[in-house]
Each structure stands twice: as C-alpha cells, then as structure tokens.
Image (cartoon, rainbow, N blue to C red):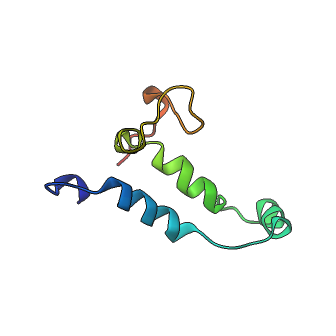
Amino acid sequence: MLKKQASPNYDEFFRAYAKAWLRSTSRKNTEAMAESDEHSPSILRVNRVVCNFQEFYDTYGIKEGDGMYVPPEERIQIW
C-alpha cells in the first residue's frame, strides 16, 4: 500500500493512474459511448476518483476555487 511506504511518490502514482485510463478516441465516438455505455468516460474515472484523496490536494497544491477541488465533506470515503 502506497501510504505505508517510507516516502511515497504520489505524483508518480497519480500520473500512472491517469495514463492507465488514457485512450485516444474521437469526440463523435465519445458522444456515442455516453449515450450507450453505462460506464463513465475515462476522464471521469480519473478526475472524479483522484479528487477524493487528500494526498492529491497535497501533491498538487489544489485549493478551494480550483477546478478539481471538492470540499472534504463531499469526498467519497470508501477506501
């Protein structure tokens, strides 16, 4: 588990997680998938997940008013 490491590299972790979901697709294909696929698009699978971790805010200096900021009381705490 990353938190248990002596000096976890959260930047490397968050970048690798995002790259794992990165894929090339056309806007037309993305729109078609939004109407037919029950799974969320890749951008939400990354952005909406990482914004639940305090380490994400600490790593990138995200604060209230920034685009990916989610107030602590609205963050999902299932992990």
Query: Which residue appears at 69% of the width and 73% of the height?
Result: 24
In this view, 72 is above or below 32 = above
Is 26 situated left or right of 45 in this image?
A: right
x, y (%) of residue 64? 51, 26
Among the 4 quarters of the image, the one containing residue 65: top right
Query: Which residue appears at 63% of the width and 72% of the height?
Result: 23
Is 71 situated left or right of 42 in this image?
A: left
Is 72 situated left or right of 24 in this image?
A: left
x, y (%) of residue 39? 65, 62
Farthest-out residue, left: 6
Farthest-out residue, bottom: 24
Q: Nearer the viewer, residue 5 or 33?
A: 5
x, y (%) of residue 63? 47, 29
In this view, 59 is above or below 71 = below
Quadrant (top left, top right, bottom left, bottom right) of the N terminus = bottom left
Farthest-out residue, front: 61
Query: Which residue appears at 81% of the width and 70% of the height?
Result: 29
Is 48 situated left or right of 38 in this image?
A: left
Q: How many marks?
A: 0
x, y (%) of residue 76? 45, 40
Query: Which residue appears at 51% of the width and 62% of the height?
Result: 18
Q: Nearer the viewer, residue 34 or 57?
A: 57
In this view, 5 is above or below 79 = below
